[in-house]
Image: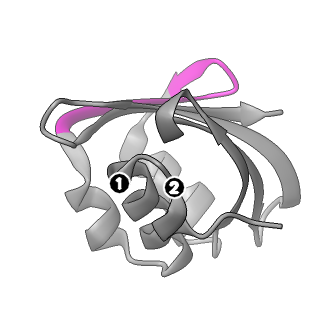
Amino acid sequence: MAIAPGKLSDPAVGALVAAVNAHDKDAFLALLAPDATMSDDGSDRDLHEWIDREIFDSGGHMDVQSESDGGRSLLVSYRNDTWGEMRTAWRFTVTQGGMISRFETGQA
């Protein structure tokens, strides 16, 4: 059973999951620190190019299966129109001000 974004322990991470699932790129970007970075399967990627390709241009959707580390580590059933559905792990670094400064994702 998936955990609703509003039930996640970290509010910034919950808001980011909600933005992905609503296909709301503006809301997603508003949660990121200005110098935010990300990696996919251990390799740093261009954040804006990656989120367009893997989330917003391909109908990305996150069903959170479990959380740990205060809601900053998620096990997610992730799907998009390019890759279908896969089990992924997501880790978030959140600033004291509640902005996401980095996220890392990859197959779990």
Specify whether 65 is left or right of 18.
Answer: right
Which one is in front, 70 or 25?
A: 70
For residue 95: magenta? Answer: no
Point out residue 48 in the picture as x, y percentages from the top left corner.
Answer: 37, 49
The numbered dot on residue 8 is 2
User: Please, is residue 14 above or below residue 80 in the view?
Assistant: above
For the point 21% across and 60% down, the residue is 30
- Dot 2 lies on which element? loop
Per the image, the residue denoted by label 1 is 11
Which quarter of the image is occupied by the N terminus? bottom right
Do the numbered discs 2 and 1 sit on residues whose CB atoms are within 8 Å?
A: yes
For the point 49% across and 81% down, the residue is 22
User: Please, is residue 86 above or below residue 28 in the view?
Assistant: above
User: Please, is residue 7 above or below residue 93 in the view?
Assistant: below
Neighbor class of circle 1 (other Cα within 10 Å; few <14, some 14-19, many 20+) is some
Which one is in front, 7 or 88?
A: 7
Amino acid type, mark 1: Pro
User: Please, is residue 31 above or below residue 84 in the view?
Assistant: above
Neighbor class of circle 2 (other Cα within 10 Å; few <14, some 14-19, many 20+) is many
Point out residue 13 in the picture as x, y percentages from the top left corner.
Answer: 42, 50
Specify whether 53 is left or right of 106.
Answer: left
- The magenta segment is 34-44
Which one is in front, 105 or 9?
A: 9
Specify whether 86 is left or right of 14.
Answer: right
Amino acid type, mark 2: Leu
Question: Could you say which quadrant of the image residue 99 lies in?
Answer: top left
In 3D space, how far apart are the residues under numbered discs 2 and 1 (Cα atoms)?
7 Å
For the point 59% across and 19% down, the residue is 43
Which quarter of the image is occupied by the C terminus? top right
Which one is in front, 85 or 46?
A: 85
Specify whether 91 is left or right of 96.
Answer: right
State the scheme by which the image is colored. Answer: one colour
